[in-house]
Image: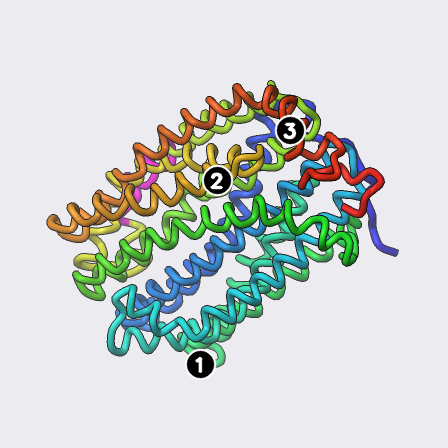
């Protein structure tokens, strides 16, 4: 007989905010590390094959894969926000319907994205600066691995829905399963079956399928929180999903597009520099996993308290999240600065690649203090009713905060490119937080004045976030 958990109160509407932030962020970070750990494990095992071209090929492919991961995060933000608001308002049946609808839309959209990306892969690799054998290796890898995106999107969405429920532990288990599966399957396919780079790509598909299965078990068998999508539910929830989902996806893909410009610029300095950037790119989400997870972790806390009209706790969540991000980034910066030589040795980095790792760990890593502030602000923007701000600030960071700084920095070599990438985020991190707190002050007045048309806890037939009482939300 299936284990089920009865509906519970919205747990984020009571108790210590900082405890909720720490619990959600730490478990979210562990899970996020597992997702990105697949790339690191791939890169590590591929580096053992002794070909620099293979490491560079993974670097180009990872830039495109990061694009798909970012889209998955955007879908997850939308699913989490509309579901958590229903939970915060005590509408558990509406929450089930919205969870089911969110999974349906996530699956459909991920299939569309996959279909569009497949024929575009050669063009995208050209834009990134991949050439010759390195380009062909990366293309072969991506033509296999790209089919794992729908599995990843569903798995991430299920993890987000568990966070919306407040089950941080099982949400972590979903994404943690990725790393465990990769540790077993990567060496099996790469070395055991002798498939090399292609084996790494095939392993990704199996790893993400396993992640999806684990998520389905917890969401369906344990929590019974996924309602069967009906035509009426699909129609009623399309607008609220898109209102949050479209800006969230646009927000998330800004980062990989900005990173793609950095990759293309670093490619001018050769495969050795690209290999170094690939290592740095895999190191960032691992070292700063808690920062990357802040948006997804803080979102359910904000949404549940918004649904319950606990505006004071919404503001307190922001302050506690910023404080956590500051302390965490300072600590990680110190750890990276004293361990960069070991990191370079693990990936057998030499020459320019080693130099880039050193420069990042000693200097550029400190810029994540401001990236963390931007992520926290984005969580508020996406979950409190003004997601367009997150789109504006993330695209500003990915364009005005990267292109001119990197363009100037490249005169000082690959290290200058990294320096430009880091410096560009400072202004956008500061301004985004200032705008966020300005909007938070107006939140109660805004809800009352607009009769809560955008929020779940006030019934309104015209509202994209109606509570679902007497409706098929």
Q: Is residue 172 left or right of residue 247?
A: right
Q: Is residue 257 magenta?
A: no
The residue at the far right in this view is 1
The secondary structure that dominates the magenta segment is helix
Q: Which mark is residue 306?
A: 3
Identify the element where label 2 is drawn. helix
Give the residue displayed 47% in from the left and 33% down from the top: 376
Which quadrant of the view contains residue 433?
top left
| Mark-to-mark CA distance, 2 and 1 | 48 Å
> Which residues lie in the magenta part?
330-341
Pointer 2 or 3: first along the chain: 3
Quarter of the image with the N terminus is bottom right
148 shown above or below 246: below
Which residue is disc 1 drawn over?
194
24 shown above or below 99: above
Give the residue displayed 54% in from the left and 21% down from the top: 442
Identify the element where label 3 is drawn. helix
Front one among 290 and 239: 239
Q: Is residue 358 visible to the viewer in this orientation of the structure?
A: no
Can you give x and y, in whole percent of width and height, for residue 77 in the image? 57, 45
Q: Is residue 335 magenta?
A: yes
| Mark-to-mark CA distance, 3 and 1 | 53 Å
Disc 2: CA contacts within 10 A as few (<14), some (14-19) or many (>=20): some
31 shown above or below 188: above
Which residue is disc 2 drawn over?
388
22 shown above or below 164: above
Which quadrant of the view contains residue 370?
top left
Identify the element where label 1 is drawn. loop
Pointer 2 or 1: first along the chain: 1
Disc 3: CA contacts within 10 A as few (<14), some (14-19) or many (>=20): many
Q: Is residue 293 left or right of residue 314?
A: left
């Amino acid at each position: 007989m299936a284990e089920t958990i009865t509906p519970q109160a919205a747990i984020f509407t009571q108790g210590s905010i900082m405890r909720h932030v720490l619990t959600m962020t730490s478990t979210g970070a562990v899970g996020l590390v597992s997702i990105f750990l697949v790339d690191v494990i791939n890169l590590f095992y591929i580096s053992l094959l002794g070909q620099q071209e293979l490491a560079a090929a993974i670097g180009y492919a990872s830039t495109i894969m990061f694009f798909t991961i970012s889209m998955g995060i955007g879908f997850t933000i939308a699913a989490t926000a509309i579901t958590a608001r229903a939970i915060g308002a005590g509408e558990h049946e509406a929450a089930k319907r919205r969870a089911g609808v969110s999974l349906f839309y996530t699956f459909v959209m991920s299939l569309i994205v996959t279909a569009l990306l497949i024929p575009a892969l050669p063009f995208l690799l050209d834009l990134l600066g991949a050439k010759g054998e390195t380009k062909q290796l990366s293309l072969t890898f991506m033509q296999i691995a790209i089919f794992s995106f729908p599995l990843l999107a569903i798995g991430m969405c299920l993890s987000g829905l568990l966070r919306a429920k407040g089950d941080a532990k099982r949400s972590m288990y979903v994404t943690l399963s990725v790393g465990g599966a990769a540790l077993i399957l990567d060496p099996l396919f790469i070395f055991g079956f002798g498939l090399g780079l292609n084996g790494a790509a095939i392993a990704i598909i199996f790893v993400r399928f396993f992640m999806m299965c684990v998520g389905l078990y917890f969401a369906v068998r344990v929590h019974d929180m996924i309602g069967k999508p009906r035509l009426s539910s699909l129609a009623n929830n399309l607008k609220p999903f898109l209102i949050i989902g479209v800006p969230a996806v646009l927000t998330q893909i800004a980062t990989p597009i900005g990173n793609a410009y950095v990759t293309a610029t670093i490619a001018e300095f050769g495969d050795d520099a690209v290999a170094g950037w690939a290592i740095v790119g895999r190191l960032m989400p691992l070292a700063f996993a808690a920062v990357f997870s802040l948006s997804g972790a803080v979102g359910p806390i904000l949404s549940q308290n918004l649904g319950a009209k606990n505006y004071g706790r919404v503001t307190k969540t922001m302050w506690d999240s910023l404080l956590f991000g500051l302390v965490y980034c300072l600590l990680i910066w110190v750890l990276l600065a004293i361990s960069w030589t070991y990191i370079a040795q693990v990936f057998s980095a030499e020459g320019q690649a080693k130099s880039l790792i050193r420069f990042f760990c000693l200097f550029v890593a400190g810029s994540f203090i401001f990236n963390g502030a931007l992520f926290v602000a984005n969580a508020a923007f996406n979950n409190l009713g003004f997601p367009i701000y997150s789109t504006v600030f993330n695209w500003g960071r990915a364009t005005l905060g990267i292109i001119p700084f990197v363009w100037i920095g490249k005169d000082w070599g690959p290290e200058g490119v990294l320096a430009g990438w880091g410096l560009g985020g400072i202004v956008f991190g500061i301004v985004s937080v200032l705008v966020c707190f300005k909007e938070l002050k107006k939140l109660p007045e805004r809800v009352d004045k607009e009769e809560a048309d955008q929020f779940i806890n006030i019934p309104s037939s015209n509202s994209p976030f109606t509570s679902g009482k007497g409706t098929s939300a």
